[in-house]
Image (spheres, rainbow, N blue to C red):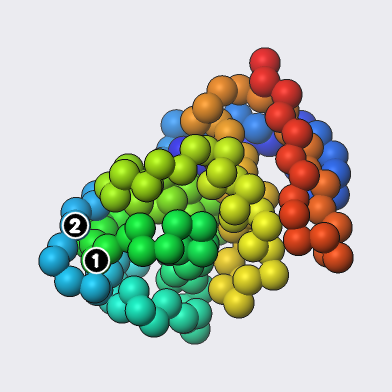
C-alpha cells in the first residue's frame, strides 16, 4: 500500500520514531515464472517495460527501473541463486511522486512477490534489514527507509526507530508494535 506518516515525517532515517499508516491506494503486481534467465517487467502506468538477465543485474539510467533491479540485487546477495527468470506486470493507483511512498510500495511489492514466487523464505524483518544495510548500493534506489515502513505495515501497526552509522554497514532497527 501507499502510506503517510501520522507523526515523524523524515525523521526515521535520523534516529527518530515514526507512526506510519497505510492508505487505500496501492500497487498491484502480477508475477509468473518463465523458463529463462531473463526477467521482463512491464509498467501499465508508464506503458513501457524492460528486460534484464539475472547474470548481469546492473543499474539503469531510468530511475524507476532501479527500484526493481535493486530488489533483485539485494535478494541475490542474501540468497544466491534463489531467483529465476520471471515476468511481472505492474499496475498502480498511487499517484507517482506525490509523497505517498509509491516507490516504497513498488520495492516492497517486488521483494515480497519474489519471496513468494520462488519460495525464498525471507521474513519481513530479513527483507527490511537486508535492504537497509545495502544503503551504499550502486543502485542508489533509496530502498531502505521507505521499504521498512511499507513492510512494517503488512506485519502490524507500529512505531519503529532506525539508527545507522555510515562507518557501520549494519542497520539497527527497533520495532515497537501496537
Q: Is residue 176 left or right of residue 74?
A: right
Q: Is residue 56 visible?
A: yes
**Measured from the top left, where is residue 105 in percent x and y?**
48, 47
Q: Tell me whether circle 2 and circle 1 mark residues in contact (CB < 8 Å).
A: yes
**Measured from the top left, where is residue 31 in percent x and y?**
24, 52
Q: Is residue 123 left or right of residue 166?
A: left
| Residue at point 58%, 66% (across, down) | 141
Examine the image and state in which quarter residue 84 appears.
bottom left
| Residue at point 81%, 53% (across, down) | 164
Regarding mark 2 in the picture, which secondary structure is present there? strand
**Measured from the top left, where is residue 64 in percent x and y?**
47, 68
Q: Which mark is residue 67?
A: none
Q: Is residue 146 above or below residue 18?
A: below
Q: Is residue 178 left or right of residue 44?
A: right
Examine the image and state in which quarter residue 165 appears.
bottom right
| Residue at point 76%, 61% (across, down) | 169
Mark 2 packing: few (<14 Cα in 10 Å), some, or many (20+)?
some
> As rendered, which of 166 and 65 lies closer to the eye?
166
> As rendered, which of 175 and 25 lies closer to the eye?
175
| Residue at point 84%, 39% (across, down) | 16
> As rendered, which of 112 and 67 lies closer to the eye?
112
Q: CA distance from mark 2 to mark 1?
A: 6 Å
**Measured from the top left, where is residue 80 in percent x and y?**
43, 63
Q: Is residue 29 left or right of residue 160?
A: left
Q: Which mark is residue 33?
A: 2
Mark 1 packing: few (<14 Cα in 10 Å), some, or many (20+)?
some
Q: Quadrant of the C terminus?
A: top right
Regarding mark 1 in the picture, which secondary structure is present there? loop
Q: Mark 1 = which residue?
A: 85
Amino acid at each position: 500500500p501507499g502510506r503517510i506518516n501520522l507523526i515523524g515525517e523524515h525523521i526515521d532515517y535520523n534516529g527518530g520514531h515514526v507512526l506510519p499508516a497505510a492508505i487505500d491506494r496501492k500497487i498491484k503486481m502480477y508475477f509468473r515464472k518463465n523458463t529463462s534467465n531473463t526477467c521482463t517487467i512491464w509498467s501499465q502506468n508508464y506503458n513501457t517495460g524492460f528486460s534484464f538477465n539475472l547474470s548481469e543485474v546492473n543499474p539503469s539510467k531510468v530511475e524507476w527501473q532501479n527500484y526493481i533491479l535493486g530488489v533483485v540485487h539485494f535478494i541475490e546477495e542474501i540468497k544466491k541463486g534463489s531467483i529465476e527468470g520471471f515476468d511481472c506486470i505492474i499496475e498502480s493507483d498511487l499517484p507517482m511522486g506525490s509523497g505517498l511512498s509509491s516507490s516504497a510500495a513498488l520495492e516492497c511489492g517486488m521483494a515480497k512477490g519474489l519471496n513468494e514466487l520462488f519460495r525464498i523464505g525471507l521474513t519481513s524483518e530479513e527483507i527490511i534489514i537486508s535492504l537497509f544495510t545495502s544503503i551504499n548500493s550502486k543502485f542508489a534506489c533509496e530502498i531502505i527507509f521507505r521499504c521498512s515502513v511499507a513492510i512494517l505495515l503488512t506485519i502490524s501497526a507500529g512505531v519503529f526507530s532506525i539508527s545507522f552509522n555510515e562507518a557501520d554497514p549494519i542497520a539497527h532497527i527497533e520495532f515497537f508494535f501496537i
